[in-house]
Amino acid sequence: MRHFVCVGLLSITLTSGIYAQYESKLAPELRELDPAASVDVIIRYNQTPTAFTHTRVASKGGRHHQTFEYINSAHYTVPAASLAELANDPDVVFINPDRKVSATAAAVNPDYGWMGVLQVTNPSDRGPYDGSDIGVAVIDSGIASDRDLSQDGDSRIVYSQSFVPGDPSTNDAYGHGTHVAGIVGGNGSKSQGAFYRVRGVASNVDLINLRVLDAYGASTDAVVIQAINKAIALKNQYNIRVINLSLGRPATASYINDPLCQAVEAAWRQGIVVVVAAGNDGRQAPTQGYGTIMVPGNDPYVITVGAMNTNGTLDRSDDKMTSYSSKGPTLFDHIVKPDLVAPGNQIFSVLAPNSTLVNLDAAGVVTVGNKYFVLSGTSMATPMVSAAAALLLDQNPHLSPDQVKAKLMRSADKVFPAATCPTGATCPTQAYKATTASDALLGGLYTTYYDIFTVGAGYLNVDNALEDTTPVPWGGSSLSPSVTRDSTNVVSLMTGSSVIWGSGSSWETSVIWGSSTLSGNSVIWGSSVIWGQSADAVQSVIWGSSIIWGSGTPAADVLSVSLYGDK
């Protein structure tokens, strides 16, 4: 077999062996492009790229945009015809396209059942801890100036910058980032004295506003990586200890070569807790939502968060998983995700005036006195965990990101029902036939099983985390473990000896994930597997080569955001 690659006016014939060598450094999307096209790429090098590096790319028709020094990478626009030559550079480790990223606020028709304002406005007594002097970087659609995000008349938005190409405004044109910021650190000033009080989880944190999403909730890898780099650079100046990423995109390859994953790992290594949304693809057919964790939530370092439905009560006994929350294991790497779940359905938070989401009256926007409004999705669950991390760091500033992650996972509630069903389905019916166009788009609604790939280590419990006095080992890793499957389809958990929750420690696996999700010898599922008639399809997608989504997933459809509730 021969492959022909056009370079300028020349046609270069490459033998299969040589082409395969080049191809191994190219992401799948870059391997069959029209040679006449131009493409935005992120090139990773074996060292920080220099001016000379950019000159070499320019000599092949490329244009340099941005260098990402923390991950030895740079963003370029290059002719597709030059990709093979660029990949042949011995200093090049891997070349990815600059993929599209979107917000992870609610899937079409989220779950019915209100998140009452008192649930977030009347937290139990947490002593003196409110996140004071802890910086939380909200990498999102911007943050609107708001009284709930101030303290004694001074804004707690201590730094703002836009990375949106061609739009220097740091205001929130989409409405998503302000909502997220309110969940993290709103103090309820605008609702004080009313019969309700809408307040965030860590009501006195400093907010670092790094805008990456445009007025329609869209962005790209390169833009988000710029913001992560900036958060790292500003870490000491603003005591940035937490990054919130309520955004993502489908996984198309292993996290190892993914630039977004490399960026969040760089932040983690710099001492910043990174909290990421799991995604809203939990209704995906034919896998019933398994294998749908989004990037960079598929990275084992970060805390990946799924969404729970409170059913509008303060009593946790009636809470259940939302139907749309993405499930693990991650594609390609088979990592256990999410790490935690938190309230994410029908969440009241701060309203950004005249923003895209607020103006979607036809979509059923629910507002409170033109001050607050409701969104659903793993986007809303994520800042709950980011704020909890800020409270832990307020309590003990010396905690490492790994220790914060371990404490949140250990202290999470681990008592769940065996299964719950969406309205319209009868347990243990495997699937509910979609009756609306929006349900059909997402693949239908399914019986939810409370396994390790659905709830992770359990349901966020902030008070438990603050009261937990069990020492967390220093120097250990809290990497999310992977799973393996044997020839009889038995799925087992794997943890390394350096992992905090390795066997034999006080943080052993049954403590972190709970005995109800594991059986003997860390077996997660036996050969009977819980996904019924879809078992073959699920096994094929998660462990096989038939990855059915990728770039075709409707995750970037920002108008799929709705403000109703789950079924």
Image (cartoon, rainbow, N blue to C red):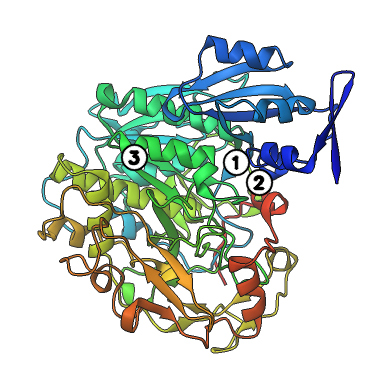
Compared across the picture, whether 234 is left or right of 100 comes to left
Circle 1 Cα neighbour tier, 10 Å, few/some/many (<14 / 14–19 / ≥20): many
- Which residue does the image show at 67% across and 70% down from the upper left? 285
Q: Residue 115 at x, y = what percent?
A: 42, 62
| Marks 2,3: beta carbons within 8 A | no
- Which residue does the image show at 69% across and 45% down from the upper left? 28
Which SS class for mark 3? helix
Compared across the picture, whether 265 is left or right of 504 comes to right
Q: Report the quarter where the C terminus lies.
A: bottom right
**Distance of mark 3 from mark 1, alpha carbons?**
21 Å
**Nearer-N-terminus badge (1/2):** 1
- Which residue does the image show at 59% across and 77% down from the upper left? 446
Q: What residue is disc 1 on?
A: 101
Q: Amino acid at mark 2?
A: Ala
Question: Measured along the vertical axis of the image, is residue 455 above or below residue 462?
Answer: below
Question: Measured along the vertical axis of the image, is residue 298 above or below residue 94?
Answer: below
Instruction: Return the residue nearer the eye: 247 or 73.
Output: 73
Q: Amino acid at mark 1?
A: Val
Circle 3 Cα neighbour tier, 10 Å, few/some/many (<14 / 14–19 / ≥20): many
